[in-house]
Each structure stands twice: as structure tokens, then as C-alpha cells.
Image (tube, rainbow, N blue to C red):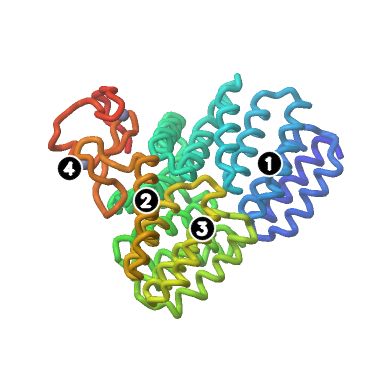
Amino acid sequence: MGQDQTKQQIEKGLSLYQSNQTQQALVVWVKVLAKTTDPGGRFRVLGCLITAHSEMGIYKEMLKYALAQIDTAREMEDPDCLAEGYLNLARSHEKLCDFQKTISYCKTCLTMQGTTVSLQLNGQVCLSMGNAFLGLSIFQKALESYEKALHFAHNNDDKMLECRVCCSLGNFYVLLKDYEKALFFPCKAAELVNDYGKGWSLKYRAMSQYHMAVAYRKLERLPDAMECCEESMKIAMQHGDRPLQALCLHNFADIHRCRNDVEKAFPRYESSMCIMTEIGNRLGQASIYLGVGKCWLQQKELDKALDSLQRAQEVAGGTGNKLISLNVHCLSERIFRIQEKHEELREQVVKFLQCVEELELYCALCGESIGEKNQQLQAMPCSHIFHLKCLQSSGTKGCSKCCRSSMKPGFV
Ligand SMILES: [Zn+2]
Ligand SMILES: [Zn+2]
């Protein structure tokens, strides 16, 4: 299969894919991959296969194709293609919750001496790196990476990237419990979709709606949360987007839990868990165990709650995520207090404080915790995070954590 025919067949696959005939598109692309003699075409078709498998949540295949893309790029001796291959490799590891590997491949990408084309990838590399740091609960570095990604998005006028970074920032502020910002960023993403997204895939709309739904739930605006989540789920179903379906089901379960309706919450956690397990999203699994634990706690089934928390801890530990461990210790502490098991209680308090220390989840101005309750936060240009009220009342220009001073206001 020569260059022209390869190009034609890739296009044929793309139009099938865009009309949601994913399986047919895959058949066409796999055939091109086997038959083409054109390395450039081979590289492109691998890119299509990577995107499709990422959206279906088949991350092991995605990883396989990313490795093949790197081999092809080496054969072509094209530095731009090589950088793109490494970005895809980093992303595959991000999806599989191998965050250390993600960070290391992102760094490889950033140090590559590419041309202007590969420089345009840098924003996406920073986004992936931010997601990996967030997965490891390294908040300052995550925020620093997201700010860089936003910077690239603005410089390249890349609205799709900006939209994706806004969604990630939404997630970031959900985890640190600044729910005002947690809602602000996905709303901004939704605005971008409305203003520029006519030609974009609907997945961007679905993604922003999902992140809005999570923020609304945290703000206890449950009908709004339900509405956004339903919208997101609808698109995820149409597109066969398994990863997003899992996230939506998880959020539906959480909404029902907030309404004290555990009868409805449990089956949704279960459905979400099936998909999370199938696609290999371990962080998602840990987070579900946490939700299930909270349900059992509501039901005063303390042993079952502890069992679920234990599982959350095990799964999260394997990914290097510390924030879930922190939550587990906090909830276990409550349970042992009810059970009046003083020794176990003390152990959990110590572990909890260790986590807080490791994650630096305190404001360097007042010394109080960050991420314990809904509070407005503000980052300095160095990406260190403080309570908004503390920054406003201190009037200092420099950061009291790293002593770097700057007049430049941060993006986020
Ligand atoms: Zn403070
Ligand atoms: Zn600082």
C-alpha cells in the first residue's frame, strides 16, 4: 500500500470514527497498519489507533501503539514525530496510573530538541505531567505544570488545550476543597466549548459537564449536579467512552450518597467499579472504595466501612497517591473513636498527621490546614498555595514557603 492509498484509507477510517462507527474504523486502520509501506502514514495511523484506544479505555493497547509509534519515528529520524511518540507513551502511563513513568517520559519530551511543531506539543506535555503530579498528590508541582500548560495554550491560541487544562484545574481544586474555584474552571471550559467548539468532538462538552457536576455536588447543589452528570453520561454512552461512563457512574453514586440514599448509591458504585477495573484505572477504584466506606459509615456498619477503607488504602498505595490515604486515616479515626478502640485510634491520628506533613497541606501564613474544609485558596506565582484570606490580610509580596518574591500575578 503506497502513500496515496494509505492517506485515503486513514481518511476513510476517520470519517467512520467521527460517525461513531468505531469498530469499522478500527478494522480499516489495522489493515492500513499491516499493509502500508509509507512510514509517515504508518506513524499517522498509529496516532489514530492511540486516540481511539484512549477514548475506549483500552490503555494496554494504547501503550503498545505508542511504543510502535516511537519505533517508527526513530526509523523516520524525525524529531517531531519522536516527541509526539513520547507524549503518547507518557499519556498511556498516565491513564494506567503509572505516574512516575508519566513524569519521566514527559521530561524526556521536554528536553528533546525539536522544531516549532514539537514545541506546540509542550503544552500537552505539561498537562499530562500536571495530571501525574496530581495523581501522586504533589500539589505544588501539579499546579506549576498546569500553569505552564495554560501559558502554552494562550501563546498558541490553543482553545482545546485550554479547555482540558481548565477541567484538570477543576479536579485540582475539588481535591483541595476550594469549591468555588472547582466550579469556576470547568464553567470556563464549558464556555470555551460554547464559543469555539462547533467543530470539536462532543467529548469536550461531556468532559466539562462532568467536572461541573462534581463541583456542584461538593457545593451540595445536587439537582444541578444531577443535570450536568446526566448530560455528560448521555454523550459518553453515545461515544462508547468507557472511562467517562465510569466517572459519571461514580459521581451519580456520590450524589445518591449525599442524599443519604445508599440503596441507589451501592449499585452505581458497583457498575463504576466494573468499568474502572476493566480499564485499569486504579485511582478510580480506590476512590470508589472510599465512597463505599462512607456509605457503610452512614449505615453504622463500622466493620464493613473499615474493610472498604482498607481496600482503598491498598489500591491507592500502589499508585503512590497520598491524598486517599489521608482520607482513609481521617475516616478510620472517626470509626475507632465510635468503637472506643483507643490504641487503633492513636495509630490513625499519627498516620493522618504524617500524611498532612508529607503533603504540605497547611497554609504557611496561619499554619492551619488546607483541604480539610471548603475554603478559598490562592496560589502564589511559585505555585505555593495559601488561604485567600491569609494572603489578603498579610499584604506580603513574597512567598513565605519558598521565599521567592514576585509581583507577577499567577494565572490560577
Ligand atoms: Zn492561612
Ligand atoms: Zn513559594
- Which percent across, then down, holds residue 335? 37, 66
| Residue, disc 3 | 286
| Extreme residue in the front direction | 343
The extreme bottom residue here reads 263
Q: Element type at marker 3? A: helix
In front of the other: 138 or 142: 138
Q: Which residue is mark 4?
A: 389
Residue nearer the viewer, 402 or 226? 402
Gap between marks 1 and 4 measured at Cα:
47 Å
Separation of disc 3 and disc 2 at Cα?
17 Å
SS class, disc 1: helix
Could you say which quadrant of the image residue 303 lies in? Answer: bottom left
User: Where residue 412 appears, x then y in whole percent?
Assistant: 32, 38
Q: Which residue is mark 2?
A: 352
Q: What mark, if any, has residue 109 been given in the picture? A: none
* Residue occupied by mark 1: 47
